[in-house]
Amino acid sequence: YSSAPFGGMLFAAGFAFALAPEPHLGSSRRAVLSSSAALAAAAISPVAPAFAQYGALEDKAQSYDAAVKNTDGDPALYMPYAKVVSKGSTSAKVMVSLPSPGPLSNNDYIDLIWLKTAQFDKQENAGGTNKDRVFPGLIAAAGEFKPNGSPVKGAATASASKSEPVFTARVKTGLTVYPVVHSAAGYVWEGAPITL
């Protein structure tokens, strides 16, 4: 009993398959297969978008922040303003509000509010001395809102009434931040900076 003839047949079959001509695919079928392969590779790719550096919400704010600001809509309705609610030695609680009446009176609503930095941030370098590193326009905090003005994250509300959203966040003291909003209509408005 010997396996040589069987092994020889496998080798011959494999060699014949390797020499067989490629099946003819029409140009449209070849394009579909190529596109499908590229789409499948992109879908499983772990590479994040170019602006990805925080978390999903802050990345969304960073992408909106690249838009032209303070051009669409009425500033009397859309201009956000920020104020310090409380201040500690390392952080301050900042509240961002909108005018009243605001975007809701224009059949629009604010879906995202964020605070972005406007200056250098002092960081400790490896040598133990403070060195300025530039972080202009980075997102310090962000909040997402439903059409009725309530936060997306948080307790569910049974109220059907609508109100302009109010966003509060703790931000590192010593920074200057700008309040910025994005509306469902695509308007981006940036308010006056405050120093914490």
Image: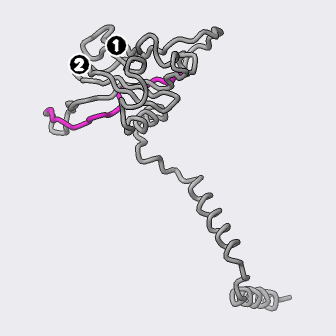
- Colour setting: one colour
Q: Main secondary structure of the magenta part?
A: strand
- Which quadrant holds the C terminus? top left
Q: Which residues are magenta?
A: 130-145
Residue 142 drawn at (x, y percent): 42, 25
Residue 122 drawn at (x, y percent): 20, 30
User: Residue 93: which numbered mark, if any?
Assistant: 1
**Residue furthest out toward the left:** 129
Residue type pointed to by label 1: Lys
Badge 1 element: strand
Residue type pointed to by label 2: Thr
- Which quadrant holds the N terminus? bottom right
The span from disc 1 to disc 2 (Cα, nearest Å) is: 12 Å
Tell me which residue sits at (73%, 82%) in the image: 23
Determine which residue is flagged by label 2: 195
Tell me which residue sits at (24%, 13%) in the image: 89
